[in-house]
Image: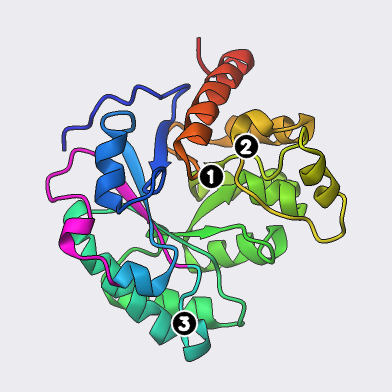
């Protein structure tokens, strides 16, 4: 496949943008982004809306970009792993023409459901390593890494979740980078905004997706630790959902990569 030149690549990593930076369909966002990114994350965050996409709502066959998928946050786990897998399989069929290489999954809460899901995935002829488990609020070091290792899945490390939910120790876990194939980078709050800062001091921390320029000192230290552990084959996703924040993040990331020696 011929890849477009990634004009926003800094350091050794392939950079990605989400399929929602302007209001519109994934196809419209792909057209809007043009050749800025060699990789696009297809964000299927709501089951019903994602299943309702028509072929024209999605990028066309032969598109030069590479793709991965973020699976819905509302998969029907309450109906069992089979129901969640059925939705996943239907969404995968919708974008099979784009050959997505990975599927980001927020792990289910119920014990045993993830193992059942992975079993169904493998029985369908798919590689468990293509499931990218994300560190969400209740899936940090103790809940995420042992399961990924046991089931043979990949990992998506989210720096905003690490900061919001006290999961930075995940980066010191031996072996965790060996399974990491994707990283989400953004700031979970704005320390310069008094309202955000006030919320951040509350026991229940509020999680947002801000541009990387909003990272505070701890945030930059955590991002540095993440980048220092990632191999060059890992994709880095600017997980922000408007073009102003995306452009801001591009500039901040480039500056930090130069400062830390990842790029000249």
The residue range painted magenta reads 52-72
Residue 167 visible in the current orientation: no
Q: Residues within 10 Å of mark 3 (few under 14, many from 20)?
A: some
Query: Where, by quadrant of the figure, is residue 150 drawn?
Result: bottom right
Asked which secondary structure carries label 1, the reply is strand
Depicted 80 relative to depicted 84: above or below: below
Asked which secondary structure carries label 2, the reply is helix
User: Which residue is the site of mark 1?
Assistant: 184
42 with respect to 62 (left or right): right
Along the line of sight, which residue is nearer the eye, 48 or 130? 48
User: Which residue is the site of mark 3?
Assistant: 76
Question: Residue 4 shows which numbered tag?
Answer: none
Image location of residue 95, percent across then percent down: 23, 60
Marks 1,2: beta carbons within 8 A? no
Asked which secondary structure carries label 3, the reply is loop
Residue appearing at x 77%, y 36% in the figure:
191
What distance separates the C-alpha of mark 1 from that of mark 3? 24 Å
In which quadrant of the rendered image does the N terminus lie? top left
What distance separates the C-alpha of mark 2 from that of mark 3? 32 Å
């Amino acid at each position: 496949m011929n890849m477009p030149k990634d004009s926003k690549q800094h350091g050794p990593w392939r950079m990605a943008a989400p399929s929602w930076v302007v209001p519109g369909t994934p196809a419209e966002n792909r057209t809007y982004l043009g050749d800025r990114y060699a990789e696009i994350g297809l964000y299927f965050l709501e089951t019903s809306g994602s299943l309702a996409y028509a072929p024209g709502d999605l990028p066309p066959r032969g598109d030069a970009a590479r793709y991965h998928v973020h699976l819905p946050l509302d998969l029907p786990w309450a109906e069992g792993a089979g129901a969640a897998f059925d939705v996943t399989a239907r969404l995968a069929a919708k974008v099979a023409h784009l050959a997505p290489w990975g599927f980001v999954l927020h792990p289910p809460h119920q014990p045993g459901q993830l193992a059942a899901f992975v079993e169904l995935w493998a029985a369908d002829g798919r590689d468990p390593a293509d499931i990218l488990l994300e560190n969400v609020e209740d899936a940090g070091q103790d809940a995420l890494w042992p399961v990924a290792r046991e089931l043979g899945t990949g990992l998506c490390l989210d720096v905003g979740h690490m900061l919001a939910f006290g999961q930075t120790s995940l980066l010191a876990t031996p072996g965790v980078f060996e399974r990491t194939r994707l990283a989400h980078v953004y700031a979970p709050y704005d320390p310069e905004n008094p309202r955000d800062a006030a919320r951040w001091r509350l026991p229940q921390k509020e999680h947002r997706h801000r541009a990387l320029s909003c990272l505070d000192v701890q945030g930059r230290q955590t991002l540095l630790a993440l980048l220092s552990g990632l191999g060059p084959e890992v994709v880095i996703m600017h997980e922000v959902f408007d073009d102003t924040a995306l452009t801001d993040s591009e500039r901040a990331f480039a500056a930090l990569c130069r400062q830390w020696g990842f790029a000249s």
